[in-house]
Image: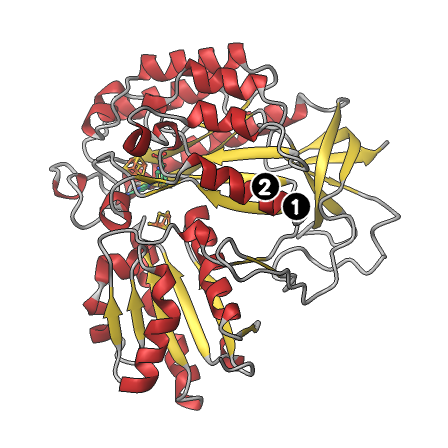
Amino acid sequence: MNKSKTYWIRTFGCQMNEHDSERLAGLLEVQGYRKVATPDLADVAVFNTCAIRENADNRLYGNLGHIKAVKDVNPDLKVVVGGCLAEKDRETIVRKAPWVDVVMGTRNIEALPALLQRVEEQGIPVVEFSETLNVFPSALPARRDNRFHAWVAIQYGCNNACTFCIVPSVRGHEDSRRIGDILGEVKDLCADGVIEVTLLGQNVNSYGRDIYSTPKFADLLLALDGIEGLKRVRYTSPHPKDFREPVARAMAESSVVCEHLHLPLQSGSSRVLKLMKRSYSREKFLDKVAMAREIIPGLALTTDIIVGFPGETEEDFAQTLSLVEEVRFDSAFTFQYSPRPGTVAATMQDQIPPEVVTERFNRLAEAQHRISLERNEAHVGEMVEVLVEGPSKKNPDKLTGRTRTNKLVHFTDRELVGAGVAPAAGTGLGRLNASIGVSSAVADAPAIPGQGEFRTLEITGASPSHMEGRLV
Ligand code: SAH
Ligand code: SF4
Ligand code: F3S
């Protein structure tokens, strides 16, 4: 244990990686490491990487180039590469960037301290991966940067085989965590001040199938209702093929599960959905949306869409556009298709020329922009309850809160602004919690005023990305 050591961590990709980074940080803090804001102050620099689209690759190697300059000044700096791109590239990373000290997989996060020790002892880079998930990362100590919100992984890996997607090959097969362990963790988190949790999995609707022989996601949602202190539950992502009535009913019945469903569409063309191996058609997707909207009052709906999947014709794309117009998602993450090595789609004939993809992408983005604006405008004049996250990133004189429907609202609160409010992101406000022995909370910065409090606002304005509100 060396109390003077420091670490810096940079996370790419999805919430699953955010969650894992909290664990990597927690493990280092238990070893006595302290978080620093820049790599030049660090003894250990960790890159937790993502491989979902090609630009992720370029970004990692660019970042490793920058870190080499830091290491030239401080040769004792240990450079760690973990996450999905580490799984994908493995030994290639130390070949391309020999100044990297540790390359580790997504399934052996708990090994970080031991791997660092091995580098110290042996003086040569270590590359280590595990096929099995020996320790569920949620059971590891976590350093959370937010007092009131926590990520909780309920499932690791993915058993689907969407032809565009690299996740199953870098995260492995689905492993569910036991319901009792999840409830235990959420109770501990709430006892420690957390009021909002986001459940994480690649296909949360199949949660439990591997260990209980039947999906248990609806039961899990219901079981969370009533945990003392817990006010909001979110989850991501449900796969449309497995999103069924019991889950929608549990969402409606539970007082804590928020009225927001992120249901990734990918394409509005049944032909393309089949090529993607998504196991649902356009019509099935529309049925699920209608079912969810009927059962859950006030539901906000968001999605993911890929443009330019191999073989996508103008007619297929028109189907995506028309579905977007019909469903009117509150917002959508739109992506240009990116061929990933090892996936079926990467070898398909008829890859779409980049200029065609970009042109379609722009048309889709424009349509969704307009719809998001219209949907947000429809709330002007309504009263909403928001959970305050901190100062607005664009205008520090304003605060940002989130509605249950996952919409951001900017507003002014004279009591809070001016009371020493600092931007929410990267404030270094830390909490260390652990479900395995090591415990106690660490707060190394003052709390952000208002963070984690509820406010009632009247909506006064809207843009595609957020709404404006007035305190009432
Ligand atoms: N498990 C989630 C998706 C996780 S990946 C699900 O099935 O919904 C997040 C999003 O990245 C996907 O929904 C998809 O829209 C996008 N994506 C995945 N692979 C991609 C690729 N090769 N090119 C472009 N976008 C991709
Ligand atoms: Fe990828 Fe499909 Fe699994 Fe989502 S469900 S992680 S898109 S393979
Ligand atoms: Fe990226 Fe891995 Fe998430 S590939 S999107 S970090 S599961």
Q: Nearer the viewer, residue 161 or 470?
A: 161
| Mark-to-mark CA distance, 1 and 2 | 6 Å
Q: Which residue: 39% across, 89% down?
A: 75
Tag 1 near tag 2, CB within 8 Å: yes
Instruction: Say which quarter of the image contains residue 285.
Output: top left
Q: Which residue: 32% across, 56% down?
A: 106
For the question of whether residue 14 can be seen, the reply is: no
Q: Which residue is label 1 attached to?
A: 191
Secondary structure under badge 2? helix
Secondary structure under badge 1? helix
Q: Residues within 10 Å of mark 1 (few under 14, many from 20)?
A: some
Q: Nearer the viewer, residue 165 or 173?
A: 173
Image position of 9 (left or right of 240): right
Q: Which residue is label 2 attached to?
A: 187
Whether disc 1's CB lies below 8 Å from ligand 3 is answered no
Q: Percent x, y for residue 463?
A: 64, 34
Q: Residues within 10 Å of mark 2 (few under 14, many from 20)?
A: some
Q: Percent x, y for residue 184?
A: 52, 41
Up-down relation of residue 375 to residue 199 (above or below): above
Q: Nearer the viewer, residue 355 or 66?
A: 66
Q: Percent x, y for residue 78?
A: 39, 79
